[in-house]
Image (cartoon, rainbow, N blue to C red):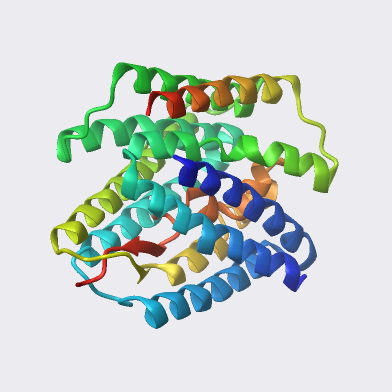
Amino acid sequence: MIAALAASILFATSITCGHRAAKIIGGASANFWRLVIATILLGIWSFGFGLGLGGAGFTFFFVSGLLGFGVGDVALYQALPRLGSRLAMLFTQCLAAPFAVIIERVWLGTQLSWLQILCISVILGGVALAIAPHETTKRDPREWRIGALFGVLSGLGGALGAVFSRRAFAAAAGAHETRTPRFNASSEAFLWQEFSSPSSDGKNPAHSLTPPVKMIAVTMPARKGECGCGLLATHLPARR
Amino acid sequence: VWLWVTCNALAGPTLGVSCMQLALRNNATGVVLAIVAMTPLAVIPLARIFEGERPTLYSLLGSVVAVAGAVGLILTK
């Protein structure tokens, strides 16, 4: 739990630093260099001190990256210009957790208590209250429906990615591996392509966002964190 | 600029993702994702400090509610 809180604070720090860097050298460049540095650091860590690419959980981690990042983030970037930054973020942030609860319950059999579900609902309610747009914006109903669909898909992708990570840990544990950093560079290049590519109207959607949502979107993969980043440095069990 | 880029890389995809994975290793996905969903709220004080951005009443209220939920989640464990 503390690790999750730390992740949240670290992502927020990353977003703030990313926003600063993006102001100076532009969002795409800042994101590119961020990924280069992160890839080098994680590469050194995982190949130097861990198993590198491979291990029992590798396939699941790889799929996790593809789903969380390939599906989740791509869908989010489709939702952004249609729904606006706040509403798109709201869909992604507030749907991923409930989807994950259901998927993990069905697939891995993890049962949460009613009290935990209540607390999760309170958290998501608070997040929704904080980031929901409070002004009414007239939108094309068709565009809104498509955007909402992508928003749901984004939440689903994020949830699936995270649950696949959980499954990867189970696979690694089943293979009797002990804690070792593992590297899964599933789609850093994809991330770069995604973030730097213009939207359908020729603009990068990140350029039209409002802070702090803009700050979040500038470093979206970091916000997604779980597997959306596609670059997973994990404390996986290493072979005894 | 390299300081910001390096801090961004370190805090997000390196340490942030590592913490997230560590959390996923030991906790249910729904619980972890709910806490990580609070990231936009954690940005608020940082945005105030570094960008001078004033938080809205809704964002403050939402933060209080979300933090209460997170405390509850920790206490239920």
Q: Residue furthest front?
A: A240
Residue B34 appears in the figure: yes
x, y percent for residue A75: 42, 47
Would residue A133 be found to the left or right of residue A223 on screen? right
Q: Which residue is drawn at 44% across and 78% down?
A: A43
Residue A162 appears in the picture as rendered: no
Quarter holding residue B47: top right
Quarter of the picture containing the C terminus of chain A is bottom left
Percent across and percent down for residue A167 are 22, 51
Left/right placement of residue A144 relative to residue A25 reads left
Residue located 77% across and 70% down the image? B1
Q: Which residue is drawn at 58% across and 75% down?
A: A37
Quick one: A236 or A18, which is closer to the camera? A236
Quarter of the N terminus of chain A within the rendering: top left
Q: Is residue A50 above or below residue B34?
A: below
> Which of the two residues, A154 or A63, is positioned nearer the viewer here?
A63
| Observer-nearest of A1 and A54 | A1
The quadrant holding residue A178 is bottom left
On screen, residue A195 above or below A167 = below
Above or below residue A181? Residue A48 is: below
Q: How many marks?
A: 0
Q: Position of residue A232 (x, y in %)?
A: 40, 63
Residue beneath the point at 51% across and 79% down: A40
